[in-house]
């Protein structure tokens, strides 16, 4: 635990887009995103080569969970089997991408593709930028399975371990894998986007990986995934709604189906953390505050397409403007989790635990206030080309 | 000598105990200046020490806002040299401090300028610069 507290007070490098809100210039929620190394950053450890992907800049801390706490997860295995694996869907009952795509074996295949492309033509570029960003995020799945397997006490030791944790991780990965596949095929068929640029971005992103600062610590890890699953649920729910508004019901179904998977995953992860609050309230509330202080970094924050050094910022600005995923959503998710885990009511905490409790409970209104002010003062941002749509320009 | 002591005492009421040698440097500076016999002029002492520095009232207002934001105990000294990060401010605190300053002084701080603020003095200087422009 001492290690974790040190992590909170660890002097973090100050970065232009990390330290302060997008007050006057941009409405993106990038304040809430993790800092990344950009060209021109004074804190660069090495000189950043032009046109190279961003890197994580924080010091990467490992194994912050004390060994005796790792034991907790072993003792939870029976509970996990009964309570977590039930949130997986049996494969035979699962949807597959083919369920939502033109059927290549059918005579009507070409017509189905034509209809898909006609519907896609009615959907504006800014929506596609966001959908592409989401698809790229999903396609970086190897990074997320890796991240789960960095966690002490729950990692899949062999790749085929039979512990409930390992079973969960593999099955979760398998379910998520369909999301990227489906969006990829849809975007390919749509004819609205530059697949090669997108594929390049995916290759860069998987190569970059990510460090969500979970320190091999499953407390931090499951708090992070709880937040993220809810964030993707919100985000895909919004893209579904937008697709419907643009008249593409099939695309709306695609996004909505993905969103329902995310909701199920959110249920599982929040249940794990709820159990941790039961077993070790002090440790868990400290972990919650720690993750929120470090900020929940978006999985694709290191995205790069070979051209735009600030690709993630630009993508998230569009997502913010379209209301697909906003700073307000960030605050709402946090507030939801605080309520879900009944953080306000926890008693018997240490002094540090109480500070953490106060911090976490008081954080959502602070974020909202910040966001309101940023919105109130935001100047009209310009248009920017995105290589994913052949350098067509989109309003940030 | 009494007035010298008085001015250096006034100084040290705003001076920082974070770095011991800083405090002694300040005292040295005021002592050597008032050695020239300008007993009644306290403000020039400040101006001499740092050119274009913000007015003490501005610094005091910044200090108050910082104290409130970070809920600092009374005995924790805050002065011009105080770094926000050392006082325990995280990035969210720093943003809220800037917001508080905007409200207090009726100014608008650009993101780029706000990023360059890391101490109380820098905040005060920026505020005065913005007030001048208004």
Image (cartoon, rainbow, N blue to C red):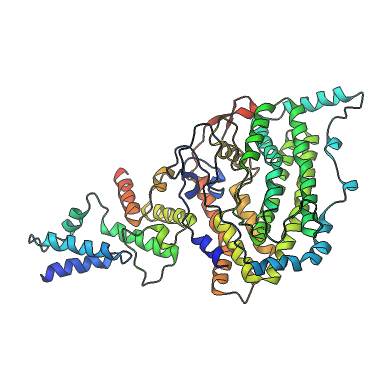
- Residue lying at the far front of the rendered structure: A158
User: How many marks overall?
Assistant: 0
Residue B124 placement, left or right of A180:
left
Q: Residue furthest bottom?
A: A348
Q: Residue at x 53, y 57 (%)?
A: A366
Image location of residue A303, percent across then percent down:
60, 38
Q: Residue at x 82, y 62 (%)?
A: A81
Q: Is residue B76 left or right of residue A77?
A: left
Residue that sits furthest to the left in the current view: B37
* Quadrant placement of the C terminus of chain A: top right
Q: Residue at x 56, y 60 (%)?
A: A363
Q: Above or below — where is A295 with respect to A257?
A: below
One can see residue A300 in this view: yes
Nearest the camera: A165 or A239? Answer: A165
Q: Position of residue A390 (x, y in %)?
A: 63, 24
Question: From this viewpoint, is residue A230 visible?
Answer: no
x and y, in percent, of residue A244 in the image = 76, 37
Residue drawn at (9%, 62%), measured in percent from left and top? B35
Res A386 quadrant in image? top right
- Percent coordinates x, y for residue B55 in the rendering: 26, 55
């Amino acid at each position: 635990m001492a290690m974790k507290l040190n992590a909170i007070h660890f002097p973090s490098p100050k970065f232009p887009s990390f330290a302060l809100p997008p007050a006057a210039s941009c409405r993106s929620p990038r304040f809430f995103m993790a800092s990344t190394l950009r060209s021109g950053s004074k804190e660069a450890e090495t000189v950043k080569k032009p046109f190279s992907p961003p890197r994580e800049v924080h010091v990467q801390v490992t194994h912050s969970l004390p060994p005796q706490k790792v034991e907790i997860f072993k003792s939870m295995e029976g509970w996990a089997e009964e309570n977590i694996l039930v949130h997986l869907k049996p494969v035979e009952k699962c949807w597959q991408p083919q369920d939502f795509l033109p059927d290549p074996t059918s005579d009507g295949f070409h017509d189905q593709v034509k209809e898909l492309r006609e519907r896609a033509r009615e959907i504006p570029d800014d929506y596609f930028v966001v959908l592409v960003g989401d698809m790229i995020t999903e396609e970086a799945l190897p990074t997320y399975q890796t991240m789960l397997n960095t966690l002490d006490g729950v990692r899949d030791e062999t790749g085929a371990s039979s512990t409930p944790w390992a079973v969960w991780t593999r099955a979760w990965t398998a379910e998520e894998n369909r999301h990227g596949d489906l969006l990829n095929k849809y975007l390919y068929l749509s004819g609205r986007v530059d697949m090669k640029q997108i594929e390049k971005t995916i290759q860069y992103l998987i190569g970059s990986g990510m460090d969500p600062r979970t320190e091999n610590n499953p407390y931090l890890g499951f708090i992070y995934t709880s937040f993220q699953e809810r964030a993707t649920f919100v985000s895909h729910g919004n893209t579904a709604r937008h697709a419907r508004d643009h008249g593409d019901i099939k695309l709306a179904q695609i996004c909505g189906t993905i969103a329902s998977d995310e909701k199920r995953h959110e249920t599982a992860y929040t249940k794990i953390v709820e159990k941790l609050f039961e077993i070790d309230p002090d440790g868990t509330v400290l972990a919650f505050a720690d993750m929120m202080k470090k900020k929940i970094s978006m999985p694709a924050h290191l995205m790069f397409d070979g051209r735009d050094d600030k690709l993630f910022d630009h993508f998230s600005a569009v997502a913010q403007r379209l209301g697909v995923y906003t700073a307000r959503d960030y605050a709402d998710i946090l507030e939801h989790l605080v309520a879900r885990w009944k953080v306000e009511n926890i008693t018997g905490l240490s002094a540090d635990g109480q500070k953490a409790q106060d911090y976490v409970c008081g954080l959502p209104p602070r974020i909202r206030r910040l966001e309101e002010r940023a919105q109130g003062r935001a100047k009209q941002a310009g248009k920017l080309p995105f290589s994913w749509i052949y350098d067509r320009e989109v309003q940030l | 000598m009494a007035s010298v002591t008085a001015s250096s005492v006034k100084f040290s009421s705003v001076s920082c105990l974070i770095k011991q040698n800083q405090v002694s440097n300040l005292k040295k500076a005021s002592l050597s200046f008032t050695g020239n016999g300008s007993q009644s002029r306290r403000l020039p002492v400040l101006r001499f020490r740092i050119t274009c520095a913000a007015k003490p009232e501005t610094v005091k207002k910044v200090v108050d806002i910082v104290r409130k934001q970070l809920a600092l105990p009374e005995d924790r000294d805050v002065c011009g040299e105080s770094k926000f990060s050392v006082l325990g401010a995280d990035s969210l605190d720093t943003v809220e401090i800037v917001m508080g300053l905007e409200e207090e002084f009726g100014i608008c701080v650009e993101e780029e300028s706000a990023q360059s603020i890391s101490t109380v003095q820098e905040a005060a200087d920026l505020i005065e610069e913005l007030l001048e422009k208004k």
